[in-house]
Image: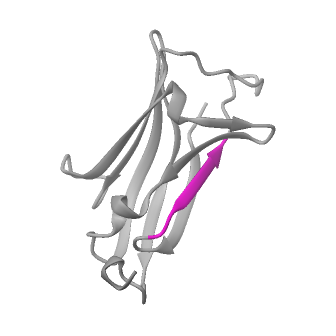
């Protein structure tokens, strides 16, 4: 199953919840287990190995509701980054599976209220 292409845009330093579904090849829902981990990785472009930032989410940090799963980027994740576009992916890794769920661009837009103003 190909990863879903997504474009995310939000003001630098804001909280950004990201929702997604876990489906098998037949589009049936999959459930996370306690051994599963999820990675949100951001780079300047697809051709570099240099990671701008990466978040690792363990089973307890991945929220689930009737609409699927959700991970949250916090203000600290992007507050020190330059404005502009980056690339990202969301990968899940379990004992016997590694799958890229989403891939796309992350654009950090202007902000007016900086952390130091709060």
Residue 29's image quarter?
Answer: top right
User: Is residue 74 rendered to the left or right of residue 42?
Assistant: right
Residue placed most toward the observer, 82 or 104: 82
Q: Tell me what residue is drawn at x 47 percent, y 69 percent.
A: 14
Please tell me whether residue 80 is drawn above or below residue 47 in the rendered image: below
Residue 24 % position (x, y): 68, 23
Task: Give the residue at the far bottom of this rendering.
Answer: 112
Magenta-drawn stretch contains 38: no
When the figure is inspected, residue 46 is found, relative to residue 66, above or below; the finding is below
Tell me where residue 86 sits by quadrant.
Answer: bottom left
Q: Which residues are magenta?
A: 14-20
Percent from the top left, x then y, of residue 26? 76, 22
Q: Residue at x 78, y 42 (%)?
A: 67
**Magenta span: chief secondary structure:** strand
Quadrant location, the N terminus:
top right
Above/below status of 49 relative to 79: above
């Amino acid at each position: 199953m190909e990863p879903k292409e997504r474009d995310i845009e939000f003001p630098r330093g804001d909280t950004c919840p990201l929702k997604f579904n876990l489906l098998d090849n037949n589009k049936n829902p999959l459930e996370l287990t306690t051994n599963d981990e999820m990675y949100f990785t951001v780079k300047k472009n697809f051709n570099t190995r240099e990671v701008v930032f990466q978040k690792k989410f363990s089973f307890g940090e991945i929220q689930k509701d009737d609409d699927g799963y959700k991970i949250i980027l916090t203000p600290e994740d992007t507050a020190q980054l330059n404005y502009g576009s980056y690339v990202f992916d969301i990968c899940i890794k379990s004992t016997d599976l590694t799958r890229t769920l989403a891939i796309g661009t992350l654009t950090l837009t202007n902000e007016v209220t900086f952390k130091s103003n709060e």
